Amino acid sequence: MRQSLIMGNWKMNGTRESSQSLCAAIMAGLNENDKNIVICVPAVYLADLQTLTSNSPLALGAQNVANQEAGAYTGEVSATMLKEFNCQYALVGHSERRTYYGDTDESVAERFCQAQKQGVIPVLCIGETLAERENGETFNVVNTQLDAVIAKAGIGAFANAVIAYEPVWAIGTGRTATDEQAQEVHKAIRERVALQDPVIAENLQILYGGSMKADNAKGLLAMPDIDGGLIGGASLDAQSFLKIYHSI
Ligand code: PEP
């Protein structure tokens, strides 16, 4: 039985002070039996938030991870570094990384492997643009992004990884995929993994991301192949984020 997982992606928002207040407000809405709730925060705030969350069910994640282990890679943050701050998850291949910073299927696969090597669970983000959807390319695009990581990491790596299906046209736009549109792609992703390993596919958490809010979360999260959410905008408001979490 798959457990649900709710992850917030704060992106490049907040200040040192506001990140601590937001984190504290989220923790205040959780009780000690809660689990499977994560915030992916700007790397510079990890140290503060590690201290703040040390006795809390709220887990920490990073928004990216370097595709190399260590060395002359200016500006990058390695998986070993993330691990030092008790980062349990790292997003890889978020569409904003792919669009603005040139992350390719190949470098995303390397990032995925680096995270896993250090015991940080990679959250592989995949999804099509609006033009690709309108051209009927959704499944091809998602399969290509997924296959690149399977080719490098091996299917066994997905026993300890998460996939986030995030249609690019739904991220930050207020335009959410319908429950059925999302379910159709989630099911196809699971079936693709199942071609190589049905047990891994059955246990794989596949999250939906793209304008998930308190008022549309329930329907999306009720779909059989949607195991949780990756939430951007709505995760910057503690009450909205908690509402999504509690709608599981
Ligand atoms: C995201 O950044 O992964 C995301 C899904 O953003 P939003 O919820 O704002 O669409």
Image (cartoon, rainbow, N blue to C red):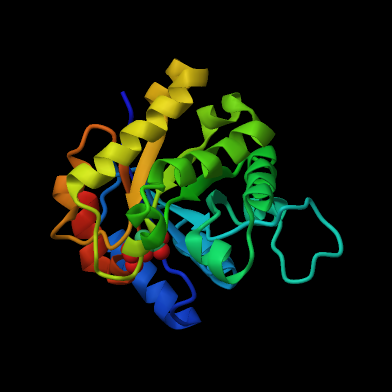
Does residue 185 appear to the left or right of 41 in the view shown?
A: left
| Res. 71 image quadrant | bottom right
Identified at 41% across, 41% down, the residue is 139
| Res. 21 image quadrant | bottom left
Q: Position of residue 97 (x, y in %)?
A: 56, 64
Identified at 59% across, 24% down, the residue is 156
Identified at 49% across, 80% down, the residue is 16
Identified at 71% across, 65% down, the residue is 76
| Res. 33 image quadrant | top left
User: Quick one: which residue is furthest to the right in this view?
Assistant: 72
In the displayed structure, 174 sits above or below 53; it is below
* Most foreground residue, 197 or 91: 197
User: Quick one: which residue is furthest to the front in this view?
Assistant: 135
Q: Position of residue 163 (x, y in %)?
A: 45, 42
| Quadrant of picture, ligand 1 | bottom left
* Most foreground residue, 229 or 175: 175
Q: Position of residue 226 (x, y in %)?
A: 28, 39
In the displayed structure, 237 sits above or below 188; it is below
